[in-house]
Image (tube, rainbow, N blue to C red):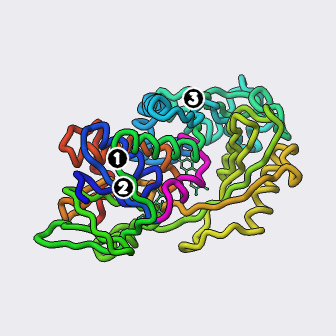
């Protein structure tokens, strides 16, 4: 079987890349080891922003802001093509810093602590709305009413729905998705990939090959990974079946990046852990206890009685959270779009656009040098 492009890995990075390439007229085959959209992309919380956007370097900002601009049209296209609603919404994010300087402050008081000044300067520079509020104005269910920062434009999406919608849209646009197809070996000759084989022995050929295998990208590339630094970093999350309307906005606790995400049907996600467990993705009683205790102390109504589920996922961890979106330095028809670490859902439309433009020799909307393959 031959196509213009073969994509290896059916998470958000692979599916969004397939969707974009198909829209640009390429033929695409996507190979997925198990079933599409079951790994990190399924497990994620769906916040469409770095947790504290001002904490990240310019390459992360550039990519996430490009995605923010692309998301409304991306979602509309998916809804039109598939009828599945990924529940994209600007539910906003309330940032609690619990700093003693700000706890008793009124929002109109000028309290010049570090977080506020850095946040305000960043938001002004990037035309990102930010307001000082009392937390109960936005989230009355919180245990404490305190001075907080309100970012009304931060959006969220419901990952499993987004993935189902993307997979359906890829097939609707003529893309071939092959599941239970684990890429196991590369045939390289004359400096180019000639074909790849799956563990079942099937051989696939294409003009170009893109690895989007998330935390497994180095494994898939084997000796061709060169100095690629992508490693699995586990995250665990709890899901509460709360009363509808208990929380309307996302809430983020600044010191430990702990967050609560309300869904439209009343479910609330509480996450997440950052754990180096290798490729082990088991949920633990220790994480459950820690997340439950944080959730309960922020919003007392979030108790064990309404705890519905716990899960984990392996993020593709990368230095400074900067993904690699590039051509292989030695094999010109081999590409990578991976290493999005904590923000792979946020970055998906932008990085799909960059890698597709690179393959199809189209102009880029931003400087892509920060996303180079390390050598
Ligand atoms: C708890 C948690 C919370 C998160 N919250 C957010 C958030 O709020 N916002 C955000 O933007 N991001 C978030 N993330 C991060 C985000 O989920 C990831 O960055 C993103 O999902 C990575 O997508 P991916 O497609 O690269 O990887 P994955 O979704 O892991 O997909 C990789 C795919 O490759 C396949 N594969 C592996 N090896 C092979 C092979 N040999 N052959 C074929 N296929 C193969 C796998 O089976 C898998 O389906 C979170 C992650 C976690 C775990």
For the residues labelled 1 and 2, the Cα–Cα distance comes to 8 Å
Which label was assigned to residue 111? none
- Label 1 neighbour load within 10 Å: few <14, some 14-19, many 20+: many
- Residue at left offset 43%, top offset 48%: 57
For the residues labelled 1 and 3, the Cα–Cα distance comes to 33 Å
Against 21, residue 14 (above or below) is below
Which label was assigned to residue 175? 1
Location of the N terminus (image quadrant): bottom left
Q: Is residue 3 magenta?
A: no
Q: Earlier in the sequence, mark 3 or mark 2?
A: 2
Which element carries disc 1, helix, strand or loop?
loop
Task: Report which residue position mark 2 lands on.
Answer: 30
Q: Is residue 80 left or right of residue 238?
A: left
Which label was assigned to residue 153? 3
Against 369, residue 132 (above or below) is above
In this rendered view, identify the residue nearer to me: 202 or 219.
202
- Residue at left offset 59%, top offset 73%: 280
Q: Which residues are magenta?
A: 34-48
């Amino acid at each position: 079987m031959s196509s213009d492009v073969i994509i290896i890995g059916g998470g958000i990075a692979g599916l969004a890349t397939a969707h974009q390439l198909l829209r640009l007229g390429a033929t695409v085959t996507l190979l997925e080891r198990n079933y599409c959209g079951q790994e990190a992309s399924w497990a994620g919380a769906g916040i469409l922003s770095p947790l504290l956007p001002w904490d990240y370097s310019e390459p992360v900002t550039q990519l996430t802001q490009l995605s923010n601009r692309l998301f409304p049209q991306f979602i509309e296209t998916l809804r039109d093509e598939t009828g599945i609603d990924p529940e994209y919404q600007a539910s906003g994010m309330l940032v609690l810093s619990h700093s003693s300087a700000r706890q008793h402050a009124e929002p109109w008081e000028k309290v010049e602590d570090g977080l506020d000044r850095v946040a305000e300067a960043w938001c002004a520079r990037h035309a990102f709305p930010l307001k000082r509020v009392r937390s109960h104005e936005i989230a009355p269910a919180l245990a404490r009413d305190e001075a907080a920062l309100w970012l009304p434009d931060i959006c969220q999406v419901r990952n499993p729905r987004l993935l189902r919608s993307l997979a359906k849209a890829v097939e609707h646009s003529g893309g071939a998705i092959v599941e239970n197809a684990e890429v196991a070996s590369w045939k390289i000759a004359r400096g180019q990939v000639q074909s790849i084989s799956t563990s079942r022995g099937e051989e696939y050929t294409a003009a170009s090959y893109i690895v989007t295998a998330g935390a497994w990208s180095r494994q898939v590339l084997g000796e061709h990974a060169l100095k690629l630094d992508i490693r699995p970093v586990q995250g665990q999350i709890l899901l509460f079946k709360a009363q509808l309307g208990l929380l309307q906005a996302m809430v983020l606790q600044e010191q430990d990046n702990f967050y609560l995400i309300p869904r439209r049907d009343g479910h609330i996600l509480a996450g997440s852990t950052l754990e180096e467990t290798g490729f082990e993705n088991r949920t633990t009683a220790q994480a459950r206890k820690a997340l439950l205790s944080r959730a309960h102390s922020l919003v007392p109504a979030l108790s064990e009685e309404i705890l519905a589920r716990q899960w984990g996922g392996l993020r593709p961890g990368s230095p400074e959270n900067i993904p690699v979106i590039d051509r292989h330095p030695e094999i010109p028809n081999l590409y990578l779009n991976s290493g999005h670490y904590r923000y792979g859902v946020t970055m998906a439309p932008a990085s799909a656009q960059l890698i597709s433009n690179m393959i199809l020799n189209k102009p880029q909307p931003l400087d892509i040098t920060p996303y180079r393959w390390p050598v």
